């Protein structure tokens, strides 16, 4: 039996056959066979500190730059990260003290902003919905401290603050339990990048070229 035949056979076993009174695909009279969902929800047991360390390691492997600080050190750290920019985009509910020491002019997240205007912005600073340690992924859901999805996709530099360990989960299944599927979710694993057929990596193609992740509270 070929690989193709095996795949099709599995599909046939998973999809119930329409009965005589069914009108077509998706309108089946009887429920199909149960699909086992016994995969692991998490790969290993970790302390909160180990979970944060794993997130940092994966983000670094993806070429994001990871910083650790506390509330007192955050304004100075953000000021240093933004020092080369003239402007910074600010979501509506970003805590004001985060940028208390930053020099760039603050621009609000406006619905009327055009892509060209957003492209001229130096950087954007946001919070996040949560972060996933096992995949090194930051998840945004358009919350008040994150703003519209486009403000984190058009500017070339994204600084994302993760409250650790509170916003850090181990795995994707754990993340999905805490995320609302009706929210505009953006999943970020490192700076935007792609590779051509010769595996030449190009960064900043469909998102920020530079990603700084600040683990707030994780020293």
Image (tube, rainbow, N blue to C red):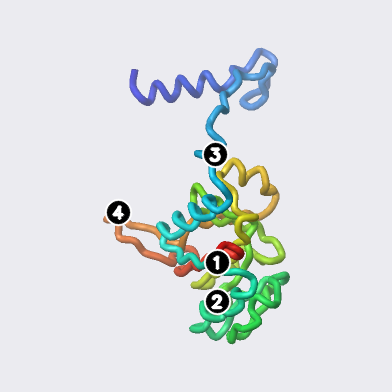
Which residue was labeled with disc 3?
42
Query: Of label 1 and label 4, which has the lower sequence position?
Result: 4
Which residue was labeled with disc 2?
77
- Disc 2/disc 1 C-alpha distance (Å): 9 Å
| Tag 2 secondary structure | helix
Q: Is residue 120 visible?
A: no
Residue 142 place in picture, x, y as percent: 67, 60
Quadrant of the snapshot with the N terminus:
top left
Are the residues flagged by discs 2 and 1 in contact, CB closer than 8 Å?
Answer: yes
Front residue of this view, candidates 29 and 143: 143
Please tell me how crowded label 4 is: few (under 14), some (14-19), or many (20+) other residues with Cα within 10 Å. Answer: few
Q: Residue at x 58, y 79 (%)?
A: 76
Image side of residue 67 versus residue 145, left or right: left
Q: Residue at x 55, y 79 (%)?
A: 121
Residue 204 place in picture, x, y as percent: 44, 67
- The outermost residue toward the left is 198
- Disc 4/disc 3 C-alpha distance (Å): 34 Å
Q: Please identify the quarter of the rendering in which residue 52 is found.
A: bottom right
Nearest-to-viewer mark from 4 and 2: 2
Are the residues flagged by discs 4 and 3 in contact, CB closer than 8 Å?
Answer: no
| Tag 3 secondary structure | loop
Which residue was labeled with disc 4?
197
- Disc 1/disc 4 C-alpha distance (Å): 33 Å
Q: Residue at x 43, y 60 (%)?
A: 60
């Amino acid at each position: 039996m070929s690989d193709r035949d095996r795949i099709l056979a599995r599909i046939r076993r998973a999809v119930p056959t329409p009965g005589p009174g069914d009108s077509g695909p998706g309108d089946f009279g009887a429920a199909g066979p149960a699909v086992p969902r016994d995969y692991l929800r998490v790969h290993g047991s970790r302390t909160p500190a180990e979970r944060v360390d794993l997130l940092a390691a994966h983000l670094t492997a993806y070429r994001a730059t990871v910083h650790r600080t506390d509330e007192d050190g955050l304004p100075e750290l953000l000021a240093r990260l933004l020092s080369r920019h003239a402007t910074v985009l600010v979501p509506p509910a970003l805590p004001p003290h985060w940028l208390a020491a930053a020099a760039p002019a603050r621009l609000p997240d406006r619905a009327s902003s055009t892509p060209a205007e957003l492209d001229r912005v130096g950087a954007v600073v946001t919070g996040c919905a949560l972060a996933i340690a096992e995949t090194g992924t930051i998840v945004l859901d358009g919350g008040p401290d994150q703003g519209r999805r486009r403000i984190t996709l058009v500017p070339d530099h994204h600084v994302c603050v993760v409250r650790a360990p509170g916003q850090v989960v181990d795995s994707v299944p754990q993340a999905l339990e805490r995320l609302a599927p009706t929210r505009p979710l953006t999943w970020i694993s490192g700076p935007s990048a792609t590779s051509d057929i010769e595996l030449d990596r190009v960064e900043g193609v469909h998102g920020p070229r530079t990603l700084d992740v600040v683990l707030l509270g994780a020293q």
